[in-house]
Image: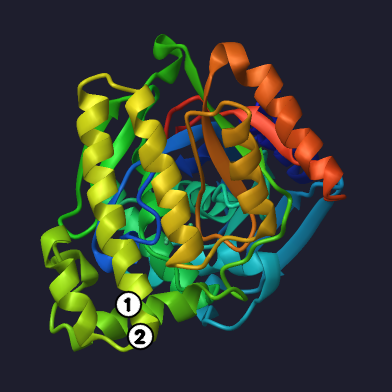
Amino acid sequence: MTPADRAAALFAEERGCAPSAVWSAPGRVNLIGEHTDYNDGFVLPFALPQRTAVAVRPRDDGRLSVATLGNDGQLHRGTVASVHELRPGDPTGWLAYPAGVAWALRDAGYPVGGADLMIVGEVPTGAGLSSSHALECAVALALLDTVQRAPGTPAAPGLEEIARLVQRAENDFAGAPTGLLDQTASLSCTAAHVLFFDVRSGAGEQIPFDPRRAGLEVLVIDTRAKHSHNESGYGERRRGCERAAELLEVKALRDVAGQELSAALPKLPEELRPLVRHVVTENDRVLTTVDELRRGRYAEIGPLLTASHVSLRDDYRVSCRELDLAVDSALAAGALGARMIGGGFGGSAIALVPTAQRPEIERAVQAAFAREHLAAPRLFTAVPSAGAGRDR
Ligand code: GAF
């Protein structure tokens, strides 16, 4: 059963009627381009097959009544008495995510009213695979669907605007100072492609990406080390980048070109230099990766992925023991490249592996974690899949 089927069935059980629509949105892997999004730079994500589905039906009393199927197999319920009175800071916890989306849509002039929502997700949570954005994007599309049904309401926003509204929900309501990568990936990726997205201009290009045709796979290694953008040093890194841009008198670090790096670094206090070095070199690595993919040179991106990890580990300092172990053990066992993905401080890594060697690389990674007495990581092949859409 897909999450959409499950959400529709649970909705009918819970509410005694069918939902008016079901929407779903995927988690993502970012092939390369980490911590570049809030520096106006480049990212290169693809959508995962794992999705979060939201069954919806409008209500006319302004109440937002949300149920979500937890990892424990139980339904968790939460209610917002009136969407008209939503303000950042209340509710908190998991309900802040759907409520924040309703708030951001209303605040932008989309007259979202009350609704019943049933949420069923299969994107692993806390794994750096963007489960919260999958949820928020699916909720945004489901709530907008209810607005479209009312006569005389404004035209539906495009995907780019929805991404910005979801970012607003995440930043201003849920309190996580994240960039635009994850929402854009969840909403705009397409099957068998990576999305080359220029955050500054908003331009996106779908680049064919089907590693299986080259006998390769992108292996996701969910280390199960917990990560959270609210608590981590994410905000601290972001502020460091903004401060560095100010000192360099540029709008964002995107404006420091690779060849200007050695002139720029001495102008900065010691502690900001590695941050800038990471962002500038990472943007370059995205461009080189796109170039290689355009020529169908899949294996050649391996060293770029590994260089990205080294930069995130040593310069940006957002890796951790589990992520380094995932990367090192995959590389030692024959991966062509590997790197942590997402915000860091836990979550997942990816490894580009020859399909024929996948079983032995998986065994080697598992064995390395067992030797270190760490929880067994969860491994799966990430197939570039479709972005968000309506299921029924
Ligand atoms: C997280 C954030 F949500 C993204 O916006 C991005 O900054 C990423 O970390 C790092 O590239 O996933």
Q: Secondary structure at mark 2?
A: helix
Q: Nearer the viewer, residue 17 or 332?
A: 332
Quadrant including the N terminus? top right
Q: Secondary structure at mark 1?
A: helix
**Quadrant housing residue 245:** bottom left
Q: Residue at x 51, y 60 (%)?
A: 313
Q: Residue at x 58, y 11 (%)?
A: 356
Q: Residues within 10 Å of mark 2 (few under 14, many from 20)?
A: few
Q: Nearer the viewer, residue 86 or 277?
A: 277
Q: Is 129 situated left or right of 247 in this image? A: right
CB within 8 Å, label 1 to label 2: yes
Q: Residue at x 62, y 81 (%)?
A: 90
Q: Residue at x 47, y 77 (%)?
A: 235
Q: Callout 1, which amino acid?
A: Arg
Total labels: the figure holds 2
Quadrant of ligand 1: it is: bottom left
Name the residue that disc number 2 marks. Answer: 270
User: Residue 256, percent across and down?
Assistant: 15, 68
Q: How is the image coloured?
A: rainbow
Name the residue that disc number 1 marks. Answer: 273
User: Residue 106, percent across and down?
Assistant: 40, 69
User: Residue 101, percent across and down?
Assistant: 48, 63
Disc marking residue 95: none
User: Residue 199, percent across and down?
Assistant: 24, 56
Q: Residues within 10 Å of mark 1 (few under 14, many from 20)?
A: many
Work out whether residue 61 can be spotted: no
Q: Callout 2, which amino acid?
A: Glu
Q: Nearer the viewer, residue 16 or 123?
A: 123
